[in-house]
Image (cartoon, grey):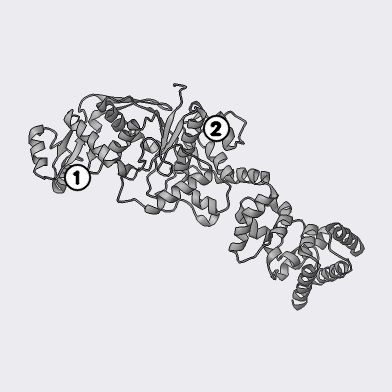
Amino acid sequence: MSSDPARVRFAPSPTGYLHLGGARTALYNFLFARQTGGQMLLRIEDTDRKRFQSAAQEQLIDSLRWLGIRWDEGPDVGGEFYPYIQSERADLHREYAYELVKSENAYLCFCDTNQLQTQQTTHGGYDGHCRHLAPSNARKRAESGEQHVVRFRTPKQGSVTVHDFLRGEITVGNAQLEDFILLKSDGFPVYHLAAMVDDHTMGITHVIRGEEWLPSLPKHAMLMRAFGWTEPIWCHLSVLKKPGGKGKMSKRDSQPLDKTSGHSIFIDDLRKFGYLPEAIINWMALMGWSLDDHQEDFTIADLQQTFSLKKLNPSPATVDFSKLDYFQGKHMRLLPAGEVAAGIKPYLQHTGLDPDDATLLRIVPLIQERLITFDDAPKWAGFFFSANVSPDPADLIAKKLNQSESLDVLQHVYRSLAALPSLKHESVEQALRSLSERLGIKLGQLLSPVRVAVSGQRVSPPLFNTLEILGKQVTLQRIKNAIKLLKEQ
């Protein structure tokens, strides 16, 4: 493979939001362009007008930028080969389609819907009914206004062989391929023609795309050859399989994942769930590529230096969300406290809380190690900003203590903390350790009902620091409320 700078493209269809498969394809194209000192193009392939979604294009661009993937040419940044939206290039595609007609590599087809349905029933597909029309006759019929499409004249004998970078030689018998449409009756190009014309005219050197395009590869190669163009290097990436490895991951899957699990195949969902782009990039990069057998932590800058097509693996890659959580936790722990505070604030606000920045910065060191995503923040920090908490009375009873004994513990704790001038965590720790010794119980038995009383939950950040942040007034009021709850049981 040439070491010259590559020109690659990510060419999504705006028929839905960006999912893992598309994002991984974009990432690999971006990394290969940067690694070779080349360029990446973003081209919007909107030839499927029936499934086109106007909001999808904007969301797709926003998701890519959030991930840190950048392109050198595209609909939003311009470039020498503008426009980069396929439907705006239809005149060029039509010009090339009729060039194929002129060279007799394509022909005009006048079969109507009823004829095509009959052919489908009888022959299982288009039977080449118009393939042998005299070109002069076909031209006259078209000039008279008769509706028609343009079809590629697929050879009926022999086979077509195409080289894929990952899979080697791929050979398909020509008899398996029908005369596929290039231009529809409305003059609008189909994907196969538009993509190949655009790849050639935009100087694309490598087509790095999903495995789902392998069935189209013979058609694309034949089109390139019919024009006499040099083919790009074809590289079809591995299939992404669903969690557990059962079945191919697809954005068209009616229930790709239960979003209540906090996971999704869509990038925008993962963003809303509080995942970091750095973690998603690290995770996606390893779904089909690896540098070696031991290194797994990569930033996008690292990947630009180390990525190589030669290290891609054509074997299916299973989407493992536990691995995403693993990388997310690692990247979360690397963030400065200020970034964590800024990240979790919207999630607290979404639950109706009003966190102040100063308190958030004090809380972050207590919870950062425990967070997987920013969406976990309300669980770990919400009680700091709640007016009240509502502990379960059963949770206020410490292990191996009964209700009366737990009530006695909380009353002693209340008096000990009330006697302190302030709840500095050092003085709180000293006071409560001394109290557990006087009461003859383990420190954990003493702290357990206190934790539930002040946080409303059985698990919380380190208690001594928690009490300091809550402050004396709030802490004592919550313990007082817990005492009342136990008395009423």
Q: Is residue 86 left or right of residue 271?
A: left
Classify 10 Å Cα crowding around label 1: few (below 14), some (14-19), many (20 and above).
Answer: some
Of callouts 2 and 1, which one flags the residue occurring earlier in the amino acid sequence?
A: 1
Q: x and y percent of residue 418 in the render?
A: 86, 69
Q: Inspect the image, locate mark 2, and give the three-letter code of the amino acid beneath it.
A: Gln
Residue 88, quarter of picture: top left
For the residue labelled by badge 1, is the local secondary structure a helix, a strand or a loop? loop
Residue 213, quarter of picture: top left
Cα–Cα gap, marks 2 and 1: 44 Å
Residue drawn at point x = 63 percent, y = 50 percent: 372
Q: Say above or below: 103 vs 486.
A: above
Q: In front here: 37 or 158?
A: 37
Residue drawn at point x = 54 percent, y = 51 percent: 271
Residue 255 in sight in this render: yes
Q: Inspect the image, locate mark 1, and give the three-letter code of the amino acid beneath it.
A: Ser
> Residue lying furthest top in this view?
2
Q: x and y percent of residue 278 in the render?
A: 58, 43
For the residue labelled by badge 2, is the local secondary structure a helix, a strand or a loop? helix
Residue occupied by mark 2: 304
Q: Is residue 162 left or right of residue 398?
A: left
Residue drawn at point x = 75 percent, y = 66 percent: 454
Residue occupied by mark 1: 185
Which quarter of the figure is the N terminus placed in?
top left
Q: Is residue 361 left or right of residue 56?
A: right
Q: Is residue 162 left or right of residue 72?
A: left
Residue 18 in sight in this render: no
